[in-house]
Image (cartoon, helix red, strand yellow):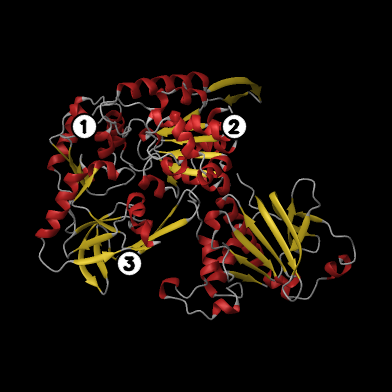
Amino acid sequence: MENENVLSCSVNIEWSNSQGIIQRKLAHKSAFLRLIRSDVREIFVEVTAGKSVPVKLQLKGISVHNKFMSEGKASIKFQEVHCIMFISNAPPSQLFTFLKTVFVKMTGEKSASNSNPSLRTQLLSNKPAKFEEISPVTLGEMEKAKAKISKGTDTTPSPLSRKRKLSPREGGKPLSSKRLYASSPTPNEPLDIEQKEVMEACLSGRNVFFTGSAGTGKSYLLKRIIGALPPDVTAATASTGVAACHIGGITLHQFAGIGTGEATLERSIELASRPGTYTIWRRCKHLIIDEISMVDGAYFEKIETIARKIRRNDQPFGGIQLILCGDFFQLPPVSKGKNPIKFCFETEAWSRCHLSSYELKKVHRQNDDEFIKILNCVRIGQIPEDMATKLAETSRQNIEKNGILATRLCSHTAEANTINESKLDALSGEKQVFTSEDSPPHLKKLLDQQTPIPHKLELKVGAQVMLLKNINIATGLVNGARGVVKSFEGDFPVVQFRNREYTAKPERWCIKTATGAMITRKQVPLKLAWAFSIHKSQGLTLDCVEMSLGKVFEAGQAYVALSRAQSLDTLRVLGFKASQAWANKKVLDFYRSLNLQMETMRLIPLGRKENKPTIKKTFKSNSKLMSKPLITIN
């Protein structure tokens, strides 16, 4: 469990005079911030780094800038002493927790700071101060801070920002306080036991590969891992653009800087030695790769060699910690020409990395035990007759509701596009066109590749659509929810979803470039959904889906398609046959070997304590800060 009172980060502190001229600077590339309290109950932040003398700054009359928490950046301005502290390279989740603790503790100190000093305070004021770490935030303090936020107290933004008229969306509440109190830059649901094991392994510095069937929370856990690592030295990548966008990262090809990887090794090393790419490779300490199953084995070997050459380090990947995530039973690498598919686990590079392997087994997407068992059998291509019959029987189900038709999953993208275009043209009424706002505009093609949202969206009343962003999880407005356009209200489509009506207003998607720059697309979060390709559906949860698997051409395609459904009740499979679902033999052999090793090496008893065995677990695989403050606390 992370300590909410301590933050590891890079720190720059500047002291200036009353005219704003900087008088003194202090910079630490690696430092710890700790919240402490003096014996007269004053709260300080203590900065320690190496053998340097700790610096203590009282948290009084401060302004906190927290807009860039998701990038591990923030600043605290100590107005009374003309000092500002710039925080960078902090693990985003750790930074969020730290600033939230500051906010809650300072909010609780308001009433005390305005009262007259106690007799105890007066008696101790002339003695040397003693400090201790502040106590953890209590439920009472959280509720007290929440109550003050809802009332719009003096913990709201500074006078300058108070003058700004709050939009209806902000609800008249201080945006900054709400941001710190309720909105984490990383997911904040508690991890289960399996996920905690993986998290601990990643934070310990080991090379890790974790896998699991569809819906076991792999991407969710990956976001938590990314949030727990320092961003300046962490590269979050994925094999596809949409998967990279989902975890807030970039594609592996962008990171590697060698294009498609088809050049010779010598030429690829030259490409990776260009100044920008060279710096990225040298700076990286943690390389995360999502959807590893779709990374070609030859490409994986090539970048592993490049990492050693560029970093002048003979360790695997040049000493970079490797965190791999994916399910090899799902979509494989795209085959090039007549060359056979080569998975990453078949390479010598994979074996050299000595990956600690984990498998997540708890399914979060589906709650139906019967459906989960069916999916597990489909995953390995071994479907008993009764399960095949159960899937075939879904062809007679009526899963439509409120005019929402089932999304047809197609094995080919071109087929899905043709269906959507023809269905839209067949509707009567005027077509409404929604064009995205891209920043910068000339990167439209890159945004098309790496975001799920189209640059140009054409809709009519009656159009079947899919929501592409989590808007309100509690009411079912989630990524993958199905709906139908009922009308247009001003410039926005009104969509009837299965459980409620929603006026779809533009949302923002942000992706990083290899150099760390942010590019954005703002668009209505909808896409035509009469049909979707199986490839494009990976990662989605669909609440109304139909498919015919007669044209599947890859191992794992049928499994990916079926596992998009929430339950058997929201699924319709046309003409299902057990022969339509199969697994790659290499993948089956890999998982057999992996599971055998994890089973035989997982539990090693080391003795007994209080009549209970102590267990040691081992794992082995087979082979810009803002210009104005967002929070002011006096």
Q: Disc 3 designates what residue? A: 505
Label placed on residue 312: 2
Q: Tag 3: Cα neighbours inside 10 Å, few (<14), some, or many (≥20)?
A: some
For label 3, the SS is loop
Label placed on residue 413: none
**Mark 2 or 1, closer to the camera:** 2
For this orientation, the residue located farthest to the right is 126
Is 535 placed above or below 358 here? below
Out of 256 and 392, give the one closest to the viewer.
256
- The CA distance from mark 1 to mark 3 is 38 Å
Say which residue appears at 54% left-offset and 31% top-offset. 309
Disc 1 residue type (three-letter):
Phe
Q: Are the residues at dot 2 and dot 1 in contact (C-beta closer than 8 Å)?
A: no
Q: Position of residue 63 (x, y in %)?
A: 64, 69
Left/right of residue 500 with respect to residue 633 in the rendered view? left
**Mark 2 or 3, closer to the camera:** 2
Look at the image and tell me whether residue 360 can be seen: no
Left/right of residue 589 with respect to residue 426 in the rendered view? right
For label 2, the SS is loop
Q: Disc 1 designates what residue? A: 553
Disc 2 residue type (three-letter):
Arg
Is 264 placed above or below 63 here? above
Q: Are the residues at dot 1 and dot 3 in contact (C-beta closer than 8 Å)?
A: no
Q: Which of marks 2 and 1 is nearer the N terminus?
A: 2
Is 209 placed above or below 129 here? above
- The CA distance from mark 2 to mark 1 is 42 Å
For label 1, the SS is loop
Quadrant containing the N terminus is: top right
